[in-house]
Amino acid sequence: MMRTKLSVAFSAVCLLGLVLTNHAFAAAADGFYDKGNIRGFISLAGDYRNMNSEFKNYINQLLFSSGANTVTDTAGKVTDTIYDASIGRYNHFDDYYMGLHVQFGAQYKQFLTWFDVNFMPTQISEKPAEYNAYGNRLYDASWFTYGVDWMFGWKLFGENAVINLIPAAGFGLNLLSVHFASNYDYPYTDGSGWVELRNRYYSTFASTFNAEVELRLNLDPFSIGGYGGYRVIRYEPISISEGSDDTTGLLGDPDTSGDTWFVGVKLTWTFLSETQQKLRDRL
């Protein structure tokens, strides 16, 4: 949990640093760059993302094989864990999903920087029946992720080339949420008690590193590009302690690899710079 807090704090400091740095540069009349030549842009992107086998197994184990999907018999002082056969009738998740992106950034000559807000359609495995053999209500099992990366790129073939190659890299945060298939009691591993898994999502944060390259066709102010790359993601265990100070209510291994490789298409609209707007107004 400490790594999660440090990741959040580190990313927050970096984002604040970007805002303060841009403000400082823009405030200087004779600063590091000519702010009149800065061009803002917005991009919409969609891609195919392939999970590694570790992450695919991690998701399926969480939702269909872990202690979160068992029934506990708390009669007397003995807690018995009984496997629920209903879980075996759910369809397991594949190793790919769609990624969707909204990007906001700025371009100065060949240099680009942007925030990539990424998310995905919720992946759902529908319940096979209303109730299981033990009378517990079944729910759809599902999971999704979303996050944000701070990216930096460079146009290799010049600022205004019709065809350009743009390598980029950045870092950020990602959140994974899962929705369990039923409403069970989960026993703490130290035997101190149990918590009820209600009909809700459980989440965990991860730090990320993203690297990609885009081949872009520029039709100023619009451009279209194809891109591909690799995103490094490391997830913390999911806590299901329900507000308890007990740290044994954890599912999954620390530093689980959620890495994905991806290929996709991006549409970008680049705004006029202040200088370009003044020239246009004079015509």
Image (cartoon, helix red, strand yellow):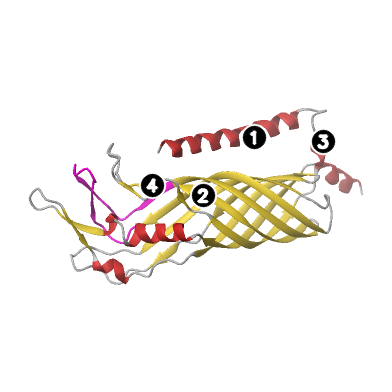
**Could you tell me the amino acid type at mark 1?**
Val
Q: Position of residue 276 (x, y in %)?
A: 85, 46
Q: Are marks 3 and 2 in contact (CB under 8 Å)?
A: no
> Of label 3 and label 2, which has the lower sequence position?
3
Quadrant (top left, top right, bottom left, bottom right) of the N terminus? top left
Few, some or many residues within 10 Å of mark 1 (<14, 14–19, 20+) = few
As measured in the structure, the alpha-carbon distance from the residue carrying label 1 to the one carrying label 2 is: 25 Å
Location of mark 4 (residue): 237
**Could you tell me the amino acid type at mark 3?**
Asp
Q: Which mark is residue 96?
A: none
Q: Position of residue 77 (x, y in %)?
A: 9, 48
Location of mark 1 (residue): 19
Magenta part, dominant SS:
loop
Q: Position of residue 274 (x, y in %)?
A: 81, 42
Outermost residue toward the right? 283
Disc 4 vs disc 1: which is toward the camera? 4
Instruction: Write the residue at 33% across / 62% down.
Output: 64
Answer with the quarter of the image where residue 162 lies.
bottom right
Location of mark 2 (residue): 233
Few, some or many residues within 10 Å of mark 2 (<14, 14–19, 20+) = many
Please tell me which residue lies in front, 127 or 70.
70
Say which element carries label 4. Answer: loop
Location of mark 3 (residue): 34
As measured in the structure, the alpha-carbon distance from the residue carrying label 3 to the one carrying label 4 is: 47 Å
Outermost residue toward the front? 53
Using residue 218 as the reference point, say whether residue 179 is left or right of it.
Answer: left
